[in-house]
């Protein structure tokens, strides 16, 4: 086994390029005709980027063995922080209702749930790597589910639906990478799918027939088959009945609890304004800093969750395509790191991290154009915020280390 | 756990494919919005950003025939609010109400205006005082979206004296907005609501300008948009009327506040309306920019109905002024000559069937010819003349002389006089039933201008232009226009001279003998028309006078009517003063355009 020497420069370069574009976007978000208090955020963001770079450099010095060794204490520590947060956490920004911030004597320190994503990734990697093979039954999924489930529950209690979605995405992506059969993943996810489809009897019926066919095709353990079908029946048939028996007021309370931004009037208005900003950008946009929707304050949270419409409005479809292409390139690089890793643990960590970036990009960008629900989740390297910038660059640092310890030359082709 | 390189390779490809599909899906979504639907979103962004603020055009001046100002514009202020939602409008109103007291009805009115057209600023106060505006300016920062504009405001220097003529302006109503005549108008605009203002709306309105302002997400005005997008308003050209403002003022002055009635003065050679007044009147200046509720109630509760034009809308039995129509009908048919006497002399009453028909002079006029009968207004003579003409020809004659048609004046609310239509038998059957009337009996009343005949003052004035011109009636025109003449009757010149002499005799020695003018021969006819309204058992009469002067080559026709005014001599005195004032005023230079 030959150890490749050197840093994955394309990976770092792409992340740096995206971050610099991000700082520029934050700068533009502050250039408004109405007072928003955002004018100087780009300076703070630059500082966060510098801190992130330093953190990434330090993390890249930690060997994969050491990381493996320290995973349980990191994970436990994170869980304790999340529990603590339920008592002392406060809201900020979009998530005014969610207790996701830690304050020390009135100064906001950060959002532990951002770092919890990384902790969950390495812990799940360790648990899966410690097994003799990939989980092949629902019972075998129980432990990995617990690793993700505990922080997930703690985060949903804040509540923070967006981050919760990222955990679910990471969970399924890493199981896929570990080699779990796709039919098992579908069966595991099926009750939730039933819940979502339950509002249209026809579509749910079709899904249910497909599910039963899948059960016969995959032939899981008889008890698990029964349990899966029963769970689907409960969520698909009982849930709508219970839902219908609730008063509209209670329904809204429940929705707002699950997702604070689900206020239909407000949320709908925001998506509409976001789409207008993006659509009015056209091919080449209105020019850097000259987006009218942004300047006049029509975009909600234009420095964090809705920073992508700023790019869409000012740089047009060309700008959007360039940013999405850079993200795609970066993620391909990361998948390669996962493919070149020498140990299952390293490989799983790399893939977990890339799936985290992937879910963030998909949900955030999709939300701005109206193809994903509004869940208040930031765009990596772009959205303003210290904890998130740090998380993104810690991810880059870890990936750089994994790449260094990987098989073959960093730029050799695997895919 | 061990990863076989082949598995890793396969999963890497799967992951890369999922990544690729996701990016293609996202890019497709953006391509659709940014390229395919770009126009739609670009318009939406502009609509978000820009609000149009209308710039009201100055209405055209209304001038009299000498160029004196009847209606002009003075600087005024409009206060309006740009709001994108009704609740934010109400929030601003609530704060404004702390500075300017506002009635709850007013807030409701503003809400209604907002619902009619929310893309334009909603007018809160259409004529705010300078004081009020400067107080609002002090609190400027508290009022996002508040727009204070200087707007021309209509002003009538002579106020109540010209009200019946010019009407007034006001905010366009819901009904008007729905009407085809007002297509292109927008909520909140000022339009003519009566008189010349309404009739000549299209010539007076000018073209509204527009200015664009940029607003932020909360509807606050950020700044004016680019200057080149501003469209300046175009004021309308002045409207020159035929009115003699001096005479109009004089007429209004005579009537004052106590008399109820109307005056129409025409130039018989052209049909020019020299003056038109209805009393009691109202102050049109108080109507501009919203009528104060108390004033509106006062006008509506007034039993003398100031808002109803006595000159155009009011219909009154013409009484003896109509005897000229009876005379002309009989003369044209050759049924009578000016010297002819009737079989039965006047003894104060005329027996027809089993009922006596009274003359206004109880002791009787004795035996008279037609000329004397006109001068003395002898009813008994005209009863017999009416019977001689017969009901059918009497009605046909009245219709031919315009007794059943509108005057054609260029003002709104030109009412149709009430007169039997042909075939007359159907008309009477419909009105009284087949047995409710018989034979010729309606002729007696019709011959003396009573019964089934109610005329508007303006229409009677039109008939007298025909008497003044020897047969040609002139359509009354307030605004300069090609004279429109209608031949009403044909009489030989000797007969015409006789008719004219009889009308002159009315004033020189007949019923209006007290109304002579030094040095001018005034021709006319009094009327004392039964109104059908009794007070303490006595019937109240409408006092009429219609006439022209000078008797030869007349320069002015005047019709005066005083509601419940008693004897026609009262109207004659007013008419003679008006005519005297007009004829003795310094010769005037008319503001007529060349070639017209």
Image (cartoon, helix red, strand yellow):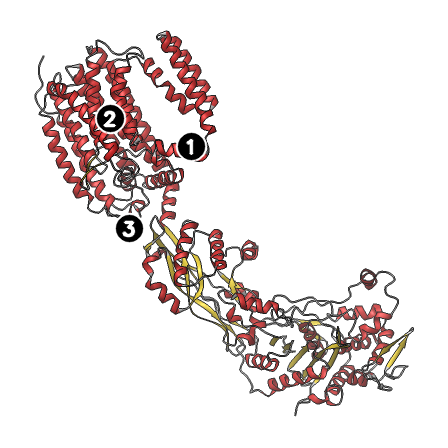
Q: CA distance from mark 1 to mark 3?
A: 36 Å
Q: Position of residue B584 (x, y in %)?
A: 59, 88
Q: Tell me if I can see residue B43 in this picture.
A: yes
Looking at the image, which is closer to me, A411 or A139?
A: A139
Name, please, the residue furthest toward the bottom. Answer: B518
For the C terminus of chain B, the image quarter is bottom right
**A178 sits left or right of B457 in the view:** left
Chain-order first, disc 2 or disc 1: 1
Chain-order first, disc 1 or disc 3: 3
Q: In the rendered view, would you say B37 is above or below B487?
A: above
Q: Secondary structure at mark 3?
A: loop
Q: Residues within 10 Å of mark 3 (few under 14, many from 20)?
A: some
Q: Secondary structure at mark 1?
A: helix
Q: Secondary structure at mark 2?
A: helix
Q: Residue at x 67, y 66 (%)?
A: B415
Look at mark 2 in the image and give the residue it sits on. A356
Q: In the rendered view, would you say A68 is above or below A91?
A: above
**A361 sits left or right of B590 in the view:** left
Circles 2 and 1 in contact, beta carbons < 8 Å: no
Residue B536 falls in which quadrant of the image? bottom right
Chain-order first, disc 2 or disc 3: 3
Q: Which chain letter goes with mark 3?
A: A
Q: Which chain letter goes with mark 2?
A: A
Q: Position of residue A357 (x, y in %)?
A: 24, 27
Q: Position of residue B141 (x, y in %)?
A: 32, 58
| Numbered tag placed on residue A251 in the rendering | 1
Query: Which mark's residue is nearer the viewer, 2 or 1?
Result: 1
**A33 sits left or right of B277 in the view:** left
Look at mark 3 in the image and give the residue it sits on. A34
């Amino acid at each position: 086994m030959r150890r490749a020497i050197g840093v994955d420069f394309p990976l770092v370069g792409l992340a740096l390029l995206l971050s610099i574009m991000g700082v520029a976007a934050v700068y533009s978000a502050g250039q408004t005709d109405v007072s928003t208090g955002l004018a100087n955020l780009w300076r703070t963001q630059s500082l966060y980027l510098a801190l992130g770079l330093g953190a990434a450099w330090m993390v890249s010095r930690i060997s994969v063995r050491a990381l493996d060794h320290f995973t349980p204490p990191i994970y436990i520590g994170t869980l304790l922080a999340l529990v603590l947060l339920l008592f002392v956490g406060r809201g900020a920004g979009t998530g005014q209702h969610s207790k996701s911030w830690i304050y020390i004597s009135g100064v906001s320190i950060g959002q532990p749930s951002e770092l919890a994503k990384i902790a969950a990734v390495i812990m799940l990697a360790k648990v899966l790597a410690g097994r003799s093979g990939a989980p092949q039954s629902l019972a075998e999924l129980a432990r990995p589910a617990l690793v993700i489930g505990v922080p997930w529950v703690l985060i949903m209690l804040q509540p923070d639906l967006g981050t919760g979605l990222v955990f679910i995405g990471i969970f399924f992506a890493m199981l896929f990478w570990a080699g779990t059969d796709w039919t098992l993943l579908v069966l595991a996810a099926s009750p939730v799918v039933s819940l979502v489809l339950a509002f249209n009897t026809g579509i749910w019926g079709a899904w249910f027939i497909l599910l039963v066919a899948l059960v016969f095709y995959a032939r899981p353990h008889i008890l698990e088959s029964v349990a899966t079908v029963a769970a689907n029946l409960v969520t698909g048939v009982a849930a709508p009945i219970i839902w219908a028996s609730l008063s509209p007021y209670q329904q809204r309370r429940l929705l707002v609890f699950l997702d604070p931004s689900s206020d239909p009037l407000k949320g709908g208005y925001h998506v509409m304004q976001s789409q207008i900003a993006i659509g009015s950008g056209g091919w080449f946009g209105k020019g850097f800093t000259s987006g009218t929707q942004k300047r006049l304050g029509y975009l909600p949270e234009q420095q964090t969750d809705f920073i992508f419409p700023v790019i869409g409005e000012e740089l047009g479809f060309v700008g959007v395509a360039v940013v999405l292409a850079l993200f795609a390139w970066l993620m391909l690089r990361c998948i390669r790191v996962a493919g070149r890793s020498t140990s299952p643990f390293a490989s799983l960590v790399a893939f977990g991290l890339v799936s985290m970036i992937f879910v963030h990009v998909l949900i955030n960008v999709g939300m701005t154009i109206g193809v994903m629900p509004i869940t208040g989740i930031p765009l990596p390297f772009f959205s303003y915020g210290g904890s998130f910038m740090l998380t993104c660059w810690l991810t880059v640092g870890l990936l750089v280390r994994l790449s260094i310890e990987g098989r073959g030359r960093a730029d050799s082709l695997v895919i | 756990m061990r990863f076989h390189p082949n598995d890793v390779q396969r999963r890497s490809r799967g992951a890369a494919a999922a990544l690729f599909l996701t990016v293609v899906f996202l890019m497709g979504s953006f391509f659709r919005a940014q390229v395919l639907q770009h126009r739609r979103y670009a318009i939406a962004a502009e609509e978000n950003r820009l609000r149009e603020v209308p710039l009201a055009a100055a209405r055209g001046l209304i001038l009299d025939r000498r160029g004196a100002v009847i209606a002009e514009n003075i600087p005024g202020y409009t206060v309006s609010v740009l709001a994108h939602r009704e609740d934010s409008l109400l929030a601003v109103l609530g704060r404004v109400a702390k500075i300017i007291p506002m009635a709850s009805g007013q807030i409701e009115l503003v809400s209604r205006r907002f619902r009619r057209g929310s893309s334009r600023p909603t007018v809160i106060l259409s004529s705010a005082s300078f004081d009020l505006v400067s107080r609002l300016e002090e609190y400027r920062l508290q009022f996002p979206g508040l727009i204070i504009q200087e707007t021309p405001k209509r002003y009538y220097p002579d106020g109540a004296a010209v009200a019946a003529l010019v009407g007034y302006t006001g905010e366009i109503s819901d009904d008007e907005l729905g009407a085809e005549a007002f297509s292109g108008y927008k909520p909140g605009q000022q339009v003519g609501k009566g008189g010349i203002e309404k009739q000549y709306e299209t010539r007076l309105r000018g073209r509204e300008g527009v200015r664009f302002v940029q607003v932020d997400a909360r509807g606050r005005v950020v700044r004016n948009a680019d200057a080149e997008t501003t469209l300046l308003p175009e004021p309308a050209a002045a409207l020159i009327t035929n009115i003699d403002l001096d005479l109009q003022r004089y007429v209004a002055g005579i009537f004052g506040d106590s008399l109820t009635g109307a005056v129409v003065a025409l130039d018989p050679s052209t049909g020019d309306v020299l003056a038109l007044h209805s009393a009691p009147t109202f102050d049109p200046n108080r109507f501009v920019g919203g009528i104060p509720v108390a004033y509106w109630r006062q006008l509506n509760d007034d039993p003398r109905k100031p808002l109803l034009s006595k000159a155009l809308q009011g219909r009154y039995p013409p009484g003896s002024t109509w005897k000229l129509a009876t005379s002309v009908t009989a003369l044209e048919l050759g049924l009578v000559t000016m010297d002819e006497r009737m079989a039965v002399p006047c003894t104060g009453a005329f027996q027809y069937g089993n009922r006596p028909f009274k003359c206004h002079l109880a002791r009787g006029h004795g035996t008279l010819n037609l000329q004397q009968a006109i001068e003395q207004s002898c009813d008994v003579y005209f009863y017999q003349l009416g019977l001689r003409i017969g009901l059918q020809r009497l009605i046909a004659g009245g219709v031919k002389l315009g007794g059943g048609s509108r005057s054609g004046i260029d003002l709104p609310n030109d009412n149709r006089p009430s007169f039997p239509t042909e075939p007359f038998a159907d008309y009477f059957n419909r009105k009284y039933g087949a047995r409710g009337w018989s034979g010729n009996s309606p002729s007696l009343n019709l011959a003396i201008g009573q019964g089934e005949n109610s005329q508007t003052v303006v229409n009677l004035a039109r008939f007298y232009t025909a008497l003044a011109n020897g047969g040609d009636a002139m359509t009354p025109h307030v605004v300069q226009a090609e004279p429109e003449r209608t031949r009403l009757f044909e009489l030989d010149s000797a007969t015409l001279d006789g008719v004219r002499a009889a009308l002159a005799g009315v004033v020189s020695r007949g019923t209006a003998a007290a109304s002579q003018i030094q040095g001018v021969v005034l021709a006319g006819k009094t009327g004392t028309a039964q109104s059908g309204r009794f007070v303490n058992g006595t019937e109240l009469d409408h006092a009429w006078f219609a006439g022209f002067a000078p008797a030869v080559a007349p320069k002015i026709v005047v019709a005066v009517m005083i509601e419940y005014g008693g004897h026609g001599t009262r109207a004659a005195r007013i008419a003679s003063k008006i005519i005297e004032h007009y004829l003795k005023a310094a010769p005037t230079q008319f503001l007529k355009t060349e070639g017209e």
